[in-house]
């Protein structure tokens, strides 16, 4: 970093820490009522039950809404955290029929925010990422600011260790540090990835354009979305693209901008099952059951304009049509084609050099099967477990692939010492990226705890023209997802407000086709969240796209954000026109 940039960064960090102490001392949290709806029913003993996280749980106590200390009118008067964290309540008369009771039974929670200050940690992290291009420093700074606001001054024991001890953090460590790093290390030691690249280059890939088309096509095929798609596509196409001299900025853009957008369009994955839980609206018959809400998801797919334009944008770049790519991607394409340089001179990839070099033992001859068999097994395990268990077991898939790759190497004569050496190189190659992922998860958790998304949602008024709501929802979800680095977390925040609000506007403004209007608003929340997650430097999919393709994280973020924004602007126009014309 230049000295001026270092000085500015230091001053910014000091100011943000002072601001965090100011908030901690002088700004009280604003408490907000949140209503969560689940599938509820009575068992054969008359007990009320509900389903959450794949489990069936019993509801022990239910009170009338007016008697709950978690209702908004009671929370507004409190200056201290409420004694209860959550409580089941009846929103209407508890003497009604069982069906009516089920539709009025909700779980109340008390959430809080610090107003605009809730966005400070994410703002600092993102700003420092852009200024310094050092994601470690930027994310850690944001975490420190957030911890101070919450009064958690022991950063290690109160923030970092609890975050590392969560299930999601353990999943990150096992999957991306051990399994993914190990698999890539074995492939590097056996030369399997290079053998695959040479085979593809000889028979199918004739240059940068065909290499990018292979990446785009694989992004369509691996439609599970999120981290799985980015890892699968990135690790598969990188050796091909490197050999064909495709810049890492282009490759990471194609990988990232097909993963989640394709998952929203070809939604035979975990998305509908997860999202349908947030779509219940009291009194709306066509969203009464889980199957109806899943059907509503699929019926809304034609309105996923951002996802459509994002996938088209990656296809155009793959064909070397750069009209919507922005100057940074054009510059990267020109640099790679004229100089053969896959990165800019100032780039610092977050994956280590061990993942970009091969160190095949003398006398060991790589075979194409050593790459394809683990890859096919990975895909098969993921797909089979998805259909049999409801969600793909990614850890099983990568563990199977790693076991097969290691077994083939040993059977072909590689010594155990050499194999372990390759595993070690792979683990070293992803250590830093795994740390970045952990910090990204931590600051996303802090942003949600501080209520940044809740504050943005609460700021939305309901006295707005119906045609403006889709754009407002799009902008708000883009901002929430960008600030928190998660689309799925944004869904949990935005859908419970957006869907009832859209239905209320449709009824109060006498729209002729309220169901279509609801689909349009649903699509804006779905797609706006995907955009924000995809462009955020603290998103796991953004980090993984850069890591698996060998790209500098901030080069990826900066080069992707403009073409993604083009797609978002076109989508916003289409949603507005759809609301005006169709409803």
Image (cartoon, rainbow, N blue to C red):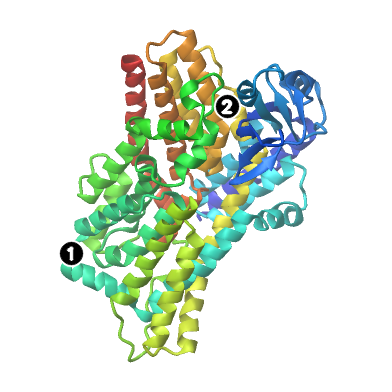
> Across the whole image, how many numbered discs are drawn on residues?
2
Note whether residue 305 is visible.
yes
Q: Would you name the residue on which mark 2 appears? A: 457
Pointers 2 and 1 in contact (C-beta within 8 Å): no
In this image, 555 relative to 35: left or right? left
In this image, 520 relative to 155: left or right? left
Q: x, y (%) of residue 195?
A: 28, 75
Note whether residue 15 is visible.
no
Q: Local crowd at mark 2 within 10 Å, few (<14), some, or many (≥20)?
A: some
Split into 4 quadrants, where in the image is the C terminus? top left
User: SS of the residue at dot 2?
Assistant: helix
- Of mark 2 and mark 1, the one earlier in the sequence is 1
In front: 491, or 106? 106
Q: Local crowd at mark 1 within 10 Å, few (<14), some, or many (≥20)?
A: few
Q: x, y (%) of residue 275?
A: 50, 37
In front: 430, or 417? 417
* Residue name at image x 45 percent, y 57 percent: 385
Q: x, y (%) of residue 436?
A: 55, 57
* Residue name at image x 31 percent, y 37 percent: 308
In front: 451, or 222? 222
Which disc, if any, is residue 204? 1
């Amino acid at each position: 970093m230049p000295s001026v940039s270092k000085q500015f960064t230091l001053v910014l960090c000091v100011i943000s820490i002072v601001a965090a102490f100011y908030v901690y001392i002088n700004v009280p949290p604003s408490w907000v009522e949140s209503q969560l709806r689940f599938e509820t029913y009575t068992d054969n003993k008359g007990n009320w039950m509900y389903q959450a996280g794949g489990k069936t749980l019993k509801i022990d106590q239910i009170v009338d809404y007016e008697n709950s200390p978690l209702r908004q009118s009671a929370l507004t008067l409190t200056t201290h955290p409420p004694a209860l964290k959550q409580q089941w309540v009846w929103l209407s008369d508890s003497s009604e029929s069982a069906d009516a009771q089920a539709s009025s039974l909700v779980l109340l929670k008390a959430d809080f925010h610090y107003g605009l200050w809730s966005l400070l940690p994410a703002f600092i992290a993102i700003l420092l990422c852009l200024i310094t291009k050092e994601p470690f420093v930027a994310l850690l700074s944001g975490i420190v600011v957030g911890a101070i606001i919450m009064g958690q001054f022991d950063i290690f024991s109160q923030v970092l260790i609890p975050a590392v001890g969560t299930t999601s953090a353990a999943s990150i460590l096992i999957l991306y540090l051990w399994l993914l790093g190990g698999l890539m290390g074995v492939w590097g030691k056996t030369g399997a990835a290079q053998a695959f690249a040479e085979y593809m280059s000889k028979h199918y890939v004739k240059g940068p354009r065909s290499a990018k088309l292979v990446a785009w096509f694989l992004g369509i095929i691996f439609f599970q979305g999120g981290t799985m798609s980015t890892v699968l596509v990135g690790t598969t196409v990188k050796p091909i693209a490197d050999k064909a001299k495709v810049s890492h900025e282009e490759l990471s853009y194609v990988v990232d901008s097909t993963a989640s957008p394709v998952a929203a369009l070809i939604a035979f994955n975990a998305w509908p099952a997860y999202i349908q839980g947030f779509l219940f609206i009291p009194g709306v018959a066509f969203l009464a059951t889980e199957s109806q809400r899943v059907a509503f998801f699929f019926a809304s797919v034609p309105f996923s304009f951002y996802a459509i334009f994002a996938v088209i944008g990656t296809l155009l770049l793959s064909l070397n049509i750069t009209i919507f790519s922005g100057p940074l991607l054009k510059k990267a394409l020109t640099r790679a084609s004229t100089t053969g340089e896959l990165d800019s001179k100032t780039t610092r990839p977050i994956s280590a050099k061990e993942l970009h070099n091969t160190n095949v033992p003398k006398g060991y001859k790589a075979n194409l099967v050593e790459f394809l068999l683990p890859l096919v097994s990975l895909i098969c395990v993921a797909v089979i477990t998805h259909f049999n268990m409801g969600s793909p077991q990614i850890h099983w898939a990568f563990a199977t692939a790693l076991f097969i790759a290691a077994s083939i190497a040993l059977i072909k004569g590689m010594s155990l010492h050499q194999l372990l050496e390759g595993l070690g190189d792979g683990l070293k190659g992803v250590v830093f990226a795994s740390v970045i992922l952990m910090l990204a998860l931590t600051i996303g958790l802090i942003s949600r705890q501080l209520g940044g998304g809740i504050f943005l949602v609460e700021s939305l008024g309901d006295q707005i023209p119906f045609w403006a709501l889709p754009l407002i929802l799009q902008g708000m979800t883009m901002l929430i997802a960008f600030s928190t680095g998660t689309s799925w977390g944004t869904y949990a925040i935005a859908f419970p407000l957006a869907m009832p609000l859209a239905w209320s506007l449709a009824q109060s403004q006498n729209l002729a086709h309220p169901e279509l209007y609801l689909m349009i608003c649903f699509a804006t929340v779905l797609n706006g969240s995907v955009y924000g997650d995809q462009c955020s430097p603290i998103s796991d999919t953004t980090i993984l796209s850069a890591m698996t393709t060998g790209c500098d994280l901030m080069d990826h973020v900066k080069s992707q954000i403009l073409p993604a924004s083009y797609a978002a602007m076109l989508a916003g126009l289409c949603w507005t026109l759809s609301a005006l014309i169709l409803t």
